Each structure stands twice: as C-alpha cells, then as structure tokens.
Amino acid sequence: MAANVEKIEALVKQLLIELGEDPEREGLIKTPERVAKSLAFLTSGYGTDPHKVIQEACFNQNTNSMVVIKNIEIYSICEHHLLPFYGRCHVGYICNGKVPGCSKIVRLVEMFARRLQIQERLTEEISCAVQETIGAMGVGVMIEARHLCMMMRGVEKQNSILVTSSVLGAFRDRPATRQEFLSLIERDKVSI
C-alpha cells in the first residue's frame, strides 16, 4: 500500500500550525509537500514481499559455504518517536544449494529498514527472511546503530550504539559457526 502523500501533506500542514508555526511563511510553504514525499520514501518498505525480492535472483549452486555481507548501511525511523536511527548491518548465511544475488540480500535489509521500526525487530525480520527465502542452513544478522531519539532528546547520549543480533539454524546451534561469523564481521569493520 502506497502512502497517501496528499493526506500526509495536509496533516503536516496542521502539525506546523499546532507547533505554533505559520505554514504560509516563505521557508515553510513547501515543507508539507517535502515532508510527505520524504516519509513516503522512508517508509516505502511496506507492501514489498521478501520472497519476490530474493526469488528474482536465486541460483542453484552446490555449496554450503558461509557468505557474509558486512557494513550494509541502514537508515530507518524509530516507531516510538519518529526519529531516525542509522548504522551498519552485517548478514551471514550458510547456503543450502541456493545462492542469492548478494545485492538481493542488501535490498532485503533496505526493504525492512524502510518501515517504522525498532532495531530489535528489524534484526529479527532480516534473519528470518533470509532463512525463509533461500532455505539457508543458518543465518546471523548483527546491527549496530545510533538512535537520534537517544541523541537529540531524552538521555542525550551522543556516543551510544545499540547492538542487536539474531542467529538461526547452524549459527545458533554451533558455537564455532557463530564465532566464525563474529570474527569475519570484526575484520576491517567500518565504524558508524
């Protein structure tokens, strides 16, 4: 379901009035339209089927190796305060006869991030979707993110980073597999 940009525009205009602003002043005239389009883009992950994202590029390959895609940039909106959080996502999986195009994994991460989110659910949604769509023997996902709701308001802590992880299948059942994943994502990791 696509966002109703016109309705959002009217709501933003009303919000500006409620905040004590004049939506007709020069700097704010186009703000409702810009905010509506921005929110539509930032929440464009709704209504997208993860199976369609992956199945377009999933290839038969006799392999059961670990694959890790790390430092995937994520930008999302916290559902509690409608403020952004951003960081890096690392995804590892063990193939089971099917190999997805690596860009499809990145698209899957982006699809879930482009929804109102909490980081904990985002991490789980990504790991479950990877396991379900490619039938992986195991999946590991770690997200490290900074939350503007903690930086700009509330506790106002500028250097805090929330780390979440989800491990399924072999990553959960085999400590050595989980450790290999963690070791691989720590190598040459980009800071957020």
Image: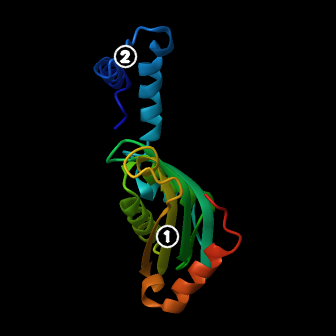
Q: Is residue 152 placed above or below 90 in the rendered structure?
A: above
Viewer-nearest of labels 1 and 2?
2
Q: Amino acid at mark 1?
A: Val
What secondary structure is found at the residue carrying circle 1?
strand
Which is more toward the observer, 21 or 102?
Answer: 21
Look at the image and tell me in which quarter the N terminus lies: top left
Q: Is residue 188 left or right of residue 159?
A: right
User: What crowding class fits label 2: few (fewer than 14 Cα within 10 Å), some (14-19), or many (20 or more)?
Assistant: few
| Quarter that holds the C terminus | bottom right
List the residue tagged with mark 1.
141
Task: Please tell me which residue is depicted at 44% across the width and 63% down the height of the picture.
Answer: 126
SS of the residue under disc 2: loop
How many residues crowd mark 1 within 10 Å: few (<14), some (14–19), many (20+)?
Answer: many
Q: Name the colouring of the figure.
A: rainbow
Looking at the image, can residue 34 be seen?
A: yes
| Image point (35%, 23%), residue name | 12
**Where does the image place residue 23, in percent across and percent down from the top left?**
39, 13
Residue at 48% x, 75% y: name it.
Answer: 139
Q: Residue at x 66, y 67 (%)?
A: 189
Q: Residue furthest right?
A: 188
Q: CB of mark 1 within 8 Å of CB of mark 2? A: no
User: Residue 76: x, y in percent?
Assistant: 46, 48
Q: Relative to 76, does residue 137 appear above or below in the rendering?
A: below
Q: Amino acid at mark 2?
A: Glu
Q: Is residue 86 above or below residue 96?
A: above
Would you name the residue on which mark 2 appears? 21
Q: Position of residue 73 (x, y in %)?
A: 59, 54
User: Which numbered disc, 1 or 2, marks the residue that appears first in the sequence?
Assistant: 2
Q: Using the numbered discs, state the Cα–Cα distance from disc 1 to disc 2 in whole angstroms.
A: 43 Å
Q: Residue 49 placed where, x, y %?
A: 40, 52
